[in-house]
Amino acid sequence: MSTFEWASVGTSVVGLLVIVASLGFVRSQVRMMAEQTQRLSQAMETSAESALDALFVVVTQAYLEYPVLRPIFNEREAAGPVPTLDIDMTYRANALAETLLDAMDRAMMFSERGFSGASTSLDAWIVDSFRHSAFLRRWYAEHAGWYGPRMDALLVKAGADREAFAVEEAAPAE
């Protein structure tokens, strides 16, 4: 073999070794990126859950500070007729309705993005909330454009559930 041929073979071997080393480096970079993506996804899910928790703290504080609001948003808890609201309490109830619906909407968005921890029993909770609060249904109807179409479907389901319950209540006992 001539010197030129040896040089050509040597260059090819060195080139092959560089390619193998580069592929190893690329593989390690892809693995690191996958791990970073997984950590970022976990951080985002934790952040989503924290945001929902913060909204629920606001709702809980409102119920504790103004217990008259609780039966407005869960008529099953009313001792007698649902209380009427003065202007200040109406503003509080409006703010609480917006906070509840924002929490519901945010939880649905997280659920749709695959953040499962944020959506446990989500539809049932929303339907139940609509079913047992005329105030929440009215407030939502006035601001439906702020929320996604999935919320509309859950409101319809809550209405059907209320109608079915009313029919069962009206039916004579056998």
Image (tube, helix red, strand yellow):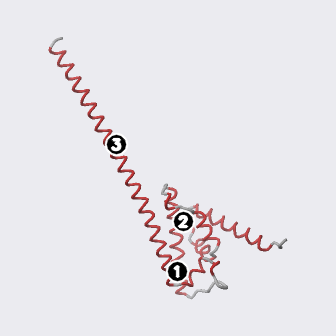
What is the three-letter code of the residue carrying label 3? Answer: Val
Q: Give residue 13's position: percent from left, percent from top.
A: 23, 23
Secondary structure under tag 2 reads loop
Instruction: Tell me which residue sits at (77%, 70%) in the image.
Output: 168
Vertical comparison of 173 with 82: above or below: above
Quarter occupied by residue 141: bottom right
Instruction: Tell me which residue sits at (37%, 46%) in the image.
Output: 34
In this view, the residue farthest toward the left is 3
In this view, the residue farthest toward the top is 1
Instruction: Tell me which residue sits at (47%, 67%) in the image.
Output: 52
Q: Are marks 1 and 3 in contact (CB under 8 Å)?
A: no
What is the three-letter code of the residue carrying label 1? Answer: Tyr
- Please tell me which of labels 1 and 2 falls first in the chain: 1
Residue for badge 2: 147
Residue for badge 1: 63
Which is closer to the viewer, label 1 or label 2?
1
Q: Give residue 102's position: percent from left, percent from top.
A: 51, 69
Q: Which mark is residue 77?
A: none
Dot 2: within a 10 Å radius of its alpha carbon, few (fewer than 14), some, or many (20 or more) residues? some
Which is closer to the viewer, label 2 or label 3?
3
Secondary structure under tag 1 reads helix
